[in-house]
Amino acid sequence: MSLIKRFGYYFFGFAIGLIFLAFFLKGKRTSCAYGPNARVLKNINLKKVNFSAFEKDSVNISKIMKHGDVIFSKSNTKLDSCKSYYINGKKELENHFITIKNCDSLVTITNYGKE
């Protein structure tokens, strides 16, 4: 069997596999949150958020919580009960930051401001 035929069979099988994969994953809400930043943001966004003193800035805070960068060097992740995270904004909120307390069932915004 020639090399060209082998590549042809390989790519044919690969294409069929992609079609089956697309069929089975269609409509499912799958995500790949493997990095530490993505895991923290996903965990935060699954919980109820207490804005308390920062309700007027809730839209900006929500954007930062969904698309921000967690700065682990400024965060306190060694706590047992409620870990504290420092999150920078991206794009139009690049100079903004929030600090949050991430407890078991509640996220509390402790600080919001500009750098």
Image (cartoon, rainbow, N blue to C red):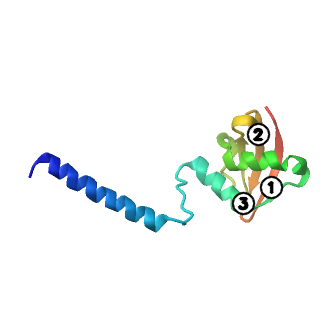
- Residue type at mark 2: give it: Phe
Q: Residue 81 carries which label?
A: 3
> Is residue 1 found left or right of 92 in the rendered image?
left
Front position among marks 3 and 2: 2
Measuring from the top left, give residue 85's x and y in whole percent: 71, 47
Q: What element carries label 2?
A: strand
Q: Of residues 7 and 86, which is closer to you in this image? A: 7
For residue 18, side relative to residue 74 (left or right): left
Horizontal side of 12 relative to 93 (left or right) equals: left
Report whether 33 appears left or right of 45.
left
5 or 40, which is in the foreground? Answer: 5
Q: In this view, does 111 lie above or below 106?
A: above
Q: Mark 2 points at which residue?
A: 97
At 32% from the left edge and 61% from the top edge, which residue is drawn? 16
- Estimate the spatial distance between the alpha carbons at disc 1 and disc 3, rounded to whole Å: 13 Å
For badge 3, the amino acid type reads Ser
Tag 1–tag 2 contact (CB < 8 Å): no
Measuring 15% from the left and 51% from the top, which residue is drawn there?
5
Q: Where is residue 90 in the image (x, y as percent from the top left)?
A: 69, 38
User: Disc 1 on helix, strand or loop?
Assistant: strand
Q: Which residue type does callout 1 highlight?
A: Thr
| Residue 79 visible here | yes
Residue at 10% over, 48% down: 2
Quadrant containing the C terminus is top right
Q: Residue 29 appears in which quarter of the rendering?
A: bottom right
- Tag 1 residue: 108
